[in-house]
Image (cartoon, helix red, strand yellow):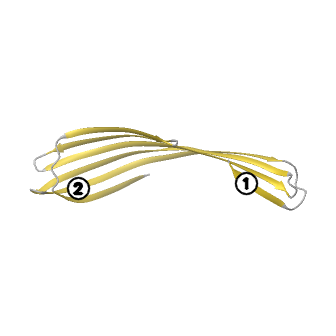
Amino acid sequence: MGAVAGTLNIVTRAPIANDGQRLTLSWADNQGRSTPSASWRQTHAGLDRDLALTATATARGFLVEERSREDAWDGVGAPLLHRQSRLRATGHRDSVSLAPSLTLRTSEDTTLSLQALVDASDFRRDIARACALIRARPARSGRRSYRTAAA
């Protein structure tokens, strides 16, 4: 799965950038989600223009876990069933993006910036479900009452 997008910006009174390179590394981890990211930017300046390219790679992982319990009793309070279930989902999304830009000086205090963004990503998810059903005894009557509690 991917996306392509572009923008056209007119910026006033922006200076032409200097030559340079910048590498940014980051890592975040929050509630089972980790996000390492690397971004590299190179800028080359000319007399009346500058060219820049930003490349970013990101990997996001996630973990979701849910547990539930359900109990049922008959009209006199005798247990009818007991059910427990568990859901566990893990996965990741990896993406790579390239963002080139060109800035042209149109007059002494005005520039024209052309920017584009190309992004490609991959998403994968694995789900595991488990359910245990224990029936305590056969129902004696047609009346049933249920109570559900999430754990």
Residue ID at (21%, 43%): 43
* Number of marks: 2
Residue ID at (84%, 48%): 136
Cα separation, mark 2 vs mark 1, equals 58 Å
**If you read the primary sequence from the N terminus, does the residue marked by circle 2 or circle 1 appear first?**
2
Circle 1: element type? strand
**116 versus 57 height, above or below:** below
Horizontally, residue 105 falls left or right of residue 131, namely: left
| Image coords of residue 83 (percent x, y) | 75, 48
| Image coords of residue 56 (percent x, y) | 34, 43
Residue ID at (18%, 43%): 44
Amino acid under disc 2: Leu
> Which residue is situated farthest in the front direction here?
77
| Image coords of residue 75 (percent x, y) | 86, 58
**41 versus 104 height, above or below:** above
Residue identifier under label 1: 148
Residue identifier under label 2: 114
